[in-house]
Image (cartoon, grey):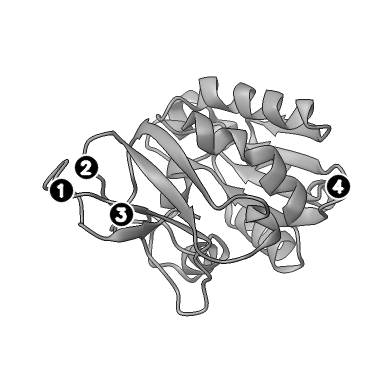
Amino acid sequence: MTRIMLTLALTVANLVSPARAAKVLIIKGDEFHAWKQTAPLIKEILSKAGHEVTVSETPGKDLTPDNLAKFDAFVLNYRNTPKGPKENPGSVWSDDNKKAFLDAVSKGKGLYVYYWASSAFTSDSPLDKEYERALAGGWRKQGNHGKAHAFTVTVRNEHPVTAGVSEFKHGPNELYQNSVMFPESTVLATAFADSKIDPKNSGKHEPVV
C-alpha cells in the first residue's frame, strides 16, 4: 500500500497536466479499510508534492456540480457500507450526488480510485452501472485476493502516469484479482499472482493500474 501511495502525487498531477499542480478533492466518510488513517496520509503526500488538497467526509453535501467544478481531480477513498448512514449520515451519496460526480468525470476531471473504493455502488441500477464504467471496473462484486505477499509491478504500456517507471518491487499486500475489465480499458501495469504462494492466487498477471 505504501509504495502505491508514493506514486499517487505523480499520478494525480499527470491526470490533469504533467507540468502543474492540481486542485484535488479526496472523497471519504465511509468504508472500513482504515480510511480515517489513510486519507490524511494521502493528503500529506499530495500536499508535499505541491497540490492543493481538500478532504470531504460529507460527500452527500459536497458532491454538487458547483463544488466539483472547483477541482481538477478526485481521489476516491470511499466505499458505501451499512454503517455509513448510522455513523456519518453526510457520507451517503444521493442520486444527485452520483450524477454530479459522473458528469464531472465525463467532462474530463481526473480520477484516482484508491484501494477498495472500486467496490462502491455495485447494484444493477443504471447510475451504478455508469459509475462502474467511470471507475473502469475494478474489484466491484467479483474481486478477490489471496494472502498478503510481496510482488513485482511491471509497466506494460507507455503513458504519462507511468513515465520513467518500468518495474518496482511492492511490499507485502493484497494483490487484487478477477477485476471487472472493459474492452476499451488500457492496462498500464500488472503483477503476477503466484499460486505457489497461495492457492487462492490466479497464477496470472493481474492488472494493477
Find numbered disc 2 in the image and state the secondary structure of the residue it sits on: loop
- Determine contact: label 2, label 1, CB under 8 Å: yes
What's the amino acid at mark 3? Gln
What's the amino acid at mark 1? Lys
Find numbered disc 1 in the image and state the secondary structure of the residue it sits on: loop
Q: Nearer the viewer, mark 4 or mark 2?
A: 2
What's the amino acid at mark 4? Lys
- Determine contact: label 3, label 4, CB under 8 Å: no
Q: Residues within 10 Å of mark 2 (few under 14, many from 20)?
A: some
- Determine contact: label 4, label 2, CB under 8 Å: no
Which residue is at 22% across, 49% downward? Answer: 194
Q: Residues within 10 Å of mark 4 (few under 14, many from 20)?
A: few
Disc nearer the start of the sequence (4/2): 4
What's the amino acid at mark 2? Gly
- Determine contact: label 3, label 2, CB under 8 Å: yes
What residue is shown with label 2? 146
Find numbered disc 3 in the image and state the secondary structure of the residue it sits on: loop
Task: Answer with left or right where residue 42 lies relative to residue 132.
Answer: right
For the residues labelled 4 and 2, the Cα–Cα distance comes to: 40 Å
Which residue is at 71% across, 55% downward? Answer: 110
Q: Let me know if residue 63 appears in the view.
A: no
Which residue is at 76% across, 32% downward? Answer: 54
**From what the image shows, is residue 160 above or below residue 59?**
below
Disc nearer the start of the sequence (3/4): 4
Could you say which is closer to the camera, residue 68 or residue 86?
Answer: 68
Find numbered disc 4 in the image and state the secondary structure of the residue it sits on: loop
